[in-house]
Image: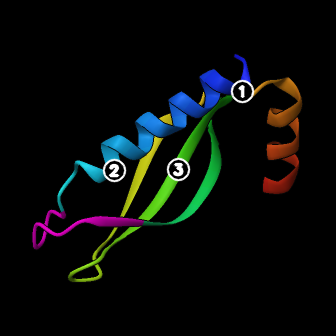
């Protein structure tokens, strides 16, 4: 993937977050932290969000096909 494709992919993730109402109060989520998790050797973007109204936390997970081998190795090193 080229940088433009990666940015569009991440933008679509935030589109999903922004269109998902809080399951407690219906408020909007605000992204607090973005992490890379590896599950069964597959990288995922995990966005930790907090409701702007009630403070409820929710983690959104998205497959991250744009993480290449070098970024994948770096992510694995930071997890160990």
Mark 2 neighbour density, 10 Å: few (under 14) some (14–19) many (20 or more): many
- Taking 53 as reference, is 15 left or right? right
For mark 3, give the secondary structure.
Answer: strand
Residue span colored magenta: 22-30
Q: CA distance from mark 1 to mark 2?
A: 21 Å
Q: Which-is-in-front pick, marks 3 and 2?
A: 2
Magenta highlight: main SS: loop
Nearest the viewer among 66 and 44 is 66
Residue 54 in the magenta stretch? The answer is no
Sequence order check, earlier mark of 3 and 2: 2
For mark 1, give the secondary structure.
Answer: helix
From the top left corner, tell me how far across and down residue 49 is, in percent: 41, 65
Residue carrying label 2: 17
Residue carrying label 3: 46
From the top left corner, tell me how far across and down residue 11 is, in percent: 48, 38
From the top left corner, tell me how far across and down residue 10 is, in percent: 53, 37
Whether pointer 1 and pointer 3 mark residues with C-beta atoms closer than 8 Å, the reply is: no
Residue 52 visible somewhere in the drawing? yes
Residue 28 in the magenta stretch? The answer is yes
Q: CA distance from mark 3 to mark 2?
A: 11 Å
Q: Is residue 17 above or below residue 62?
A: below
Mark 1 neighbour density, 10 Å: few (under 14) some (14–19) many (20 or more): few
């Amino acid at each position: 993937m080229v940088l433009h494709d990666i940015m569009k992919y991440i933008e679509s993730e935030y589109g999903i977050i922004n269109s998902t109402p809080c399951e407690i109060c219906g408020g909007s989520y605000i992204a607090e932290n973005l992490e890379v998790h590896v599950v069964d050797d597959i990288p995922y973007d995990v966005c930790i969000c907090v409701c702007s109204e009630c403070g409820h936390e929710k983690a959104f997970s998205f497959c991250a096909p744009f993480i290449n081998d070098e970024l994948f190795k770096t992510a694995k090193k930071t997890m160990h």
